[in-house]
Image (spheres, coloured by chain):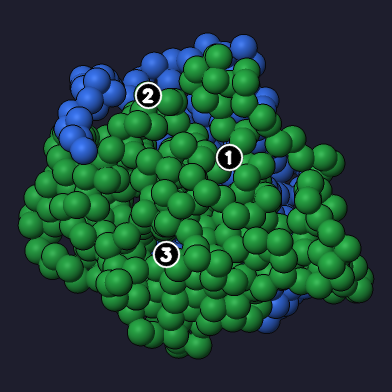
Chain colours: A blue, B green
């Protein structure tokens, strides 16, 4: 029996197709202007954080007792706080804390959540049952309570705050990822990987994880804004980032308690920064979800 | 007769229905219910039957993708059902699989090259990276693709091309046995012929043994040396191709064959068709005695009472029927 070595279908599509990521970005901006606005806010925030040393007019930690509680004006554009520290500079530097905590918590939460979710779906049976019940326990707590509990155990500070905020994200990520991974687990390519004698680790990391990245990315983006808000909340409660680090929640705490009436700029501008950042991340996250979810895709 | 490569004895796979954490088991699907056959080195054994008769499950049990409920599977003299996981993983490269759906059998996040090279790396068949890439290109050529396809992703290929990639991936491990699980059912008729020819050609070149699962009787007739006919989880007939197609012994096989159209309208019009009454019974609650008796045109009282054993009627031709 003769074989047809190179068939017509082997020769079609012989030109290398190019991935038009630039076109994709353009489409995203045109079709989802709100999402693009969100992305612009995020980019602005990243730019602020990256060039804080250049942009900030003052050192965020230097106290100036001659200029305590001065109102916004030509010297200090957004005024100063009770220690005479420049509010604008502290907001600019605070974007570093916010981004670091937000990105750190999202990354840690997404990585652990994804591993737990995919592992749970892959092994199935009793492993899945036990893991999911443990996740249920975590789900039972309100996010802020869980984060507070972790801080209470580990103590305050940037590193611990990141862990505290990542903790409530892990079960949420794990559940979303597990749902996708359950479908991936039944696909013939995972069967093929098992039939080829690959180890569990390779199947989970190389064959299942890359195919559940879309929901994971969306979760992580959506969680970024929430993480920034949570960091501010923890700092506001005095259990987050500690003085004298520049952090938005911390600035609010110092301002709102005593100076809400006498020096409202101290609370107003950090509050605005928090709102804008969360708004930007949420807009972008929502649009990204819509753009990547084929069921929600328009046209 | 040549050496036996695979020996399946009394293979049973039952799936529980219901039976969650709190609920009771409500039933058992008898997907495979006592299947036995041998596969000799170098032959192609066709496994036919209609949807839901357990042919795919039989294949998956042989590959140990499903744990059989009971029964034994001996492959190259080793008992698979009791083999520890590490030993099983090593043995897997000697038995490979080609899936029905070429669209979901390749990982969409890996290039064709990565897909073919991965088993070479994991099983340390080719340890040097450049040599692996070279071997992948060689395999692509063997299955009728171009070496530059290695850089593509699965979505950039057609169904027929992807099925060729699936074959190349299976070949990469230099297996003795390939379970072909309906490898052409999802393809266009013109591409079907190409893939069947390719499989035959590769069998000659690499001395492969195939378990060819299909529901298309003409494809099975073309490629198989021997054929196993399954109905509702049981083997009803085993014979070499010629005697099965020319002198079927089991009434179910006769009915199946009479459903294959003859490409001659005059002959087709004159031919007597056996049309089976009713539906395939549920494997949740199979009939007593011979599972085929409610639909059998020649059933007698004994058929409802007694399960017919698979008997050798003429040399090499077995059927499970009281009347054969």
Q: Secondary structure at mark 1?
A: helix
Choose between A144 and A8: the one closer to the eye.
A8
Point out residue B62 in the picture as x, y percentages from the top left corner.
Answer: 49, 69
Using residue B305 as the reference point, say whether residue B234 is left or right of it: left
Is the residue B183 above or below the residue A170 in the image?
above
Q: Position of residue B22 (x, y in %)?
A: 90, 73
Q: Which of label 3 and label 1 is nearer to you?
A: 1
Q: Relative to A275, is A210 above or below?
A: below
Q: How far from the left and from the top, in percent, is residue A14?
A: 21, 22
* Residue where numbered disc 3 is placed: A195
Say which quadrant the C terminus of chain B sits in: bottom right
Q: Nearer the viewer, residue A280 or A189?
A: A189
Q: Residue at x 34, y 75 (%)?
A: B4
Q: How many other residues sit within 10 Å of disc 1, few (<14), some (14-19) or many (≥20)?
A: some
Q: Secondary structure at mark 2?
A: helix
Q: Residue at x 72, y 70 (%)?
A: B308
Element on which disc 3 rests: helix
Report whether A101 appears left or right of B25.
left
Residue B314 seen by the camera: yes
To which residue does mark 2 refer? B190
Classify residue A177 by image quadrant.
Answer: bottom right
Where is residue A48, by image quadrant?
top left
- Residue that numbered label 1 is attached to: B257
- Residue at x 49%, y 34% (from the top left corner): B186
If the image is split into quadrants, where does the N terminus of chain B sit?
bottom left
Mark 2 on the same chain as mark 1: yes
**B283 shown above or below B14:** above
- Spatial CA span between label 3 and label 1: 33 Å
Q: Which residue is at 67% across, 73% downward? A: B309
Numbered disc in front, either 3 or 2: 2
Distance Cα–Cα, label 3 vs label 2: 29 Å
């Amino acid at each position: 029996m003769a074989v047809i070595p190179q068939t017509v279908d082997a020769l079609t599509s012989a030109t290398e197709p190019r991935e038009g990521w630039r076109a994709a970005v353009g489409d995203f901006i045109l079709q989802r202007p709100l999402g693009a606005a969100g992305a612009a806010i995020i980019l602005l925030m990243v730019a602020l954080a990256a060039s804080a040393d250049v942009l900030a007019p003052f050192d965020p930690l230097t106290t100036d007792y001659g200029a305590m509680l001065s109102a916004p004006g030509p010297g200090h554009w957004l005024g100063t706080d009770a220690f005479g520290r420049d509010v604008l500079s502290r907001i600019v530097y605070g974007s570093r804390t916010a981004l670091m905590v937000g990105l750190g918590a999202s990354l840690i939460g997404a990585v652990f959540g994804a591993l737990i979710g995919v592992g749970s779906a892959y092994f199935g049976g009793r492993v899945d049952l036990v893991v999911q019940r443990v996740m249920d326990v975590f789900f039972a707590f309100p996010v802020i309570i869980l984060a507070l509990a972790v801080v209470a155990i580990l103590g305050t500070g940037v590193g611990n705050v990141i862990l505290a905020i990542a903790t409530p994200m892990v079960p949420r990520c794990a559940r979303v990822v597990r749902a996708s991974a359950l479908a991936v687990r039944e696909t013939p390519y995972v069967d093929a990987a098992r039939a080829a004698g690959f180890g569990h680790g390779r199947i989970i990391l190389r064959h299942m994880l890359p195919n559940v990245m879309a929901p994971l990315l969306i979760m992580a983006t959506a969680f970024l804004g929430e993480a920034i808000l949570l960091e501010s909340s923890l700092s506001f409660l005095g259990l987050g980032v500690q003085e004298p680090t520049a952090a938005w929640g911390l600035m609010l705490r110092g301002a709102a308690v005593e100076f809400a009436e006498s020096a409202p700029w101290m609370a107003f501008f950090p509050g605005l920064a928090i709102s804008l950042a969360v708004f930007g991340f949420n807009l972008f996250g929502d649009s990204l979800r819509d753009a990547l979810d084929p069921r929600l895709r328009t046209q | 007769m040549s050496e036996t490569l695979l020996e399946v004895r009394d293979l049973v796979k039952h799936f529980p229905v219901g039976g969650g954490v709190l609920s009771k088991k409500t039933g058992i699907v008898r997907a495979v219910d006592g299947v036995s056959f041998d596969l000799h080195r170098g032959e192609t054994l066709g496994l036919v039957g209609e949807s839901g008769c357990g042919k795919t499950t039989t294949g998956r049990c042989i590959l140990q993708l499903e744990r059989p409920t009971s029964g034994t599977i001996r492959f190259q003299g080793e008992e698979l059902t009791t083999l520890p996981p590490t030993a099983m993983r090593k043995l897997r490269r000697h038995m490979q699989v080609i899936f029905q759906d070429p669209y979901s059998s390749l990982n969409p996040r890996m290039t064709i090259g990565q897909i073919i090279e991965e088993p070479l790396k994991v099983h340390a068949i080719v340890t040097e990276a450049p040599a692996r890439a070279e071997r992948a290109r060689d395999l692509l050529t063997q299955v009728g693709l171009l070496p530059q396809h290695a850089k593509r992703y699965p979505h950039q290929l057609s169904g027929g091309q992807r099925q060729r990639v699936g074959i190349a991936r299976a070949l990469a491990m230099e297996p003795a046995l390939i379970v072909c699980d309906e490898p052409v059912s999802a393809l266009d008729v013109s591409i079907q012929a190409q893939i069947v020819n390719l499989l035959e050609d590769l069998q000659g070149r690499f001395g492969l043994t195939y378990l060819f699962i299909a529901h298309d009787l003409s494809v099975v007739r073309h490629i198989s040396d021997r054929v196993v006919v399954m109905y509702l989880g049981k083997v009803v007939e085993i014979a070499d191709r010629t005697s099965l197609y020319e002198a079927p012994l089991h009434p179910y096989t006769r009915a199946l064959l009479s459903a294959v159209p003859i490409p001659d309208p005059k002959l087709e019009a004159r031919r007597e068709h056996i049309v089976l009454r009713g539906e395939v019974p549920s494997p949740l609650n199979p009939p007593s005695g011979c599972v085929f008796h409610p639909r059998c045109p020649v059933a007698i009282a004994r058929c409802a009472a007694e399960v017919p054993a698979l008997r050798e009627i003429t040399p090499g031709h077995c059927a499970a029927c009281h009347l054969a």
